[in-house]
Structure formats: C-alpha cells, structure tokens
Image (tube, rainbow, N blue to C red):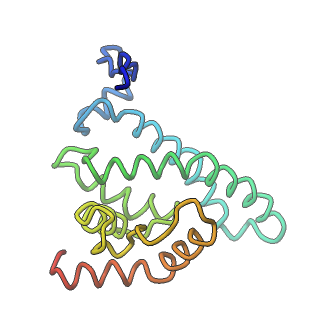
Amino acid sequence: MKVLTTITDPQYQPRTDFSAYERFWLKYMNDERDLPFIHLLTRIHLILLPWIVLMFLPIVQGWYWWLLYIPYAYVAQSYFKGRFGLMFHCMCHRPLFKKDYSWLHTYVTWVIAPIFGNTPETYFAHHIIMHHVENNMEEDASSTLHYQRDNPVHFLKYFFRFITMGFVDTFMYLFHRTRK
C-alpha cells in the first residue's frame, strides 16, 4: 500500500488588511476569498472595455482598426479568456454576489461573458443544469464518454459536434426534462 505524505496544498489565510477598494466590494460579495475575481473584473473593465469601445468608434478605420484589433485579440484571448472562464465557472457554482446584488451576476453574464464567447445564460444551463446533473454519462448531451480524449480526431469530432449542435442538444435536454 502506498504511504500518503502530508497534504501540502495551500490553505486560505483570512486577511485583515483590505484596501478601501476591496472593503467597498466586500459589502456586495458572499465570500472574501473571491476578491481575485473582483480584481479580474476590474482589469477587464479598465483594459478591455475601453479598447472595445475604441474599436467600434467610426474614427478608427482601415488598417488603424487592425492596429488596435491585433493586440486586443492577443491580450483578450491569451491573458483574460482563461482567467475569465475559470472565474465564470466558479460564479456559476457559487454565487459571487449577495442575493440583493444578483443583478451584478446578470451584468457579468450578459455584458462581460459575451466578450469571451459565452452566450448569455447558456453556460449555466449547459454546465450546471445538464452536465453536472448527468455527470458526463449517457444522458448528458455533451458527454465525452464515446470519445478517446487523447485522440486529435476524436477531439475534432467532439468540438465540431459541440460547436454546431451544442445549443440544440442543451435546449432539447432541458425541454424534454421540463427544466428552466
């Protein structure tokens, strides 16, 4: 039998030295451990949103637009997208904001999430209402059971099926089980 060693995973250490900005947001949040999400959302609002607005203004056209878009696409996709995806996943599992401020979750879902390719409300419906309930088994419309995960061809089959039929599959799953 294998002897297990001492667990060395990092443990959360409660803080007492919050900045004024953090103290402001803690009034609206359920858990202080989620402050990194607030910092991420702040960076998205300060960096990406002005960039997006600038690209939609009619004063930026032609190759100037591409000079703005290329670095934007790199920063949005390489720096922010993965971080946002993890944050949004966590927000769907455990609400970030207190019940009286749930409109902030709606704002993130409807305004910020589409910047990263998430259509409003579909991530929650797919991931929480179907995928977690069915636990990736046969009834899960996006189950990976029939795919060999280390096979690039299987990955492409799954990817294109999900990209083309994912919404329909999720909708039909919810419709047949009368889940809202």
From the image, which quarter does the N terminus lie in? top left
Left or right: where 116 falls relative to 90: right
Left or right, 115 with reference to 6: right
Quadrant of the rendered structure where residue 36 is? top left
Measured as percent of width and height from the top left, residue 92 is found at 30, 54
Residue sitting at 58 percent across and 59 percent down? 150
Q: Which residue is at a point 33% across and 64% down the rendered structure image? A: 136
- Number of numbered discs present? 0
**Residue that lies at the very extreme toward the front in this rendered image:** 1
The image quarter in which residue 113 lies:
bottom left
Quadrant (top left, top right, bottom left, bottom right) of the C terminus: bottom left
Whether 64 is drawn above or below 15: the answer is below
Residue 164, percent from left and from top:
50, 82
Determine the residue positioned at 39% across, 52% down.
Answer: 88
Along the line of sight, the residue nearer the viewer: 92 or 139: 139
Side of 140 where 42 appears, left or right? right
Residue 2 pos. (x, y %)? 38, 25
> In the rendered view, would you say 86 is above or below 116?
above
Q: Say which of 99 and 126 sits in front.
A: 126
Q: Quadrant of residue 137?
A: bottom left
Q: Is residue 120 above or below residue 8?
A: below
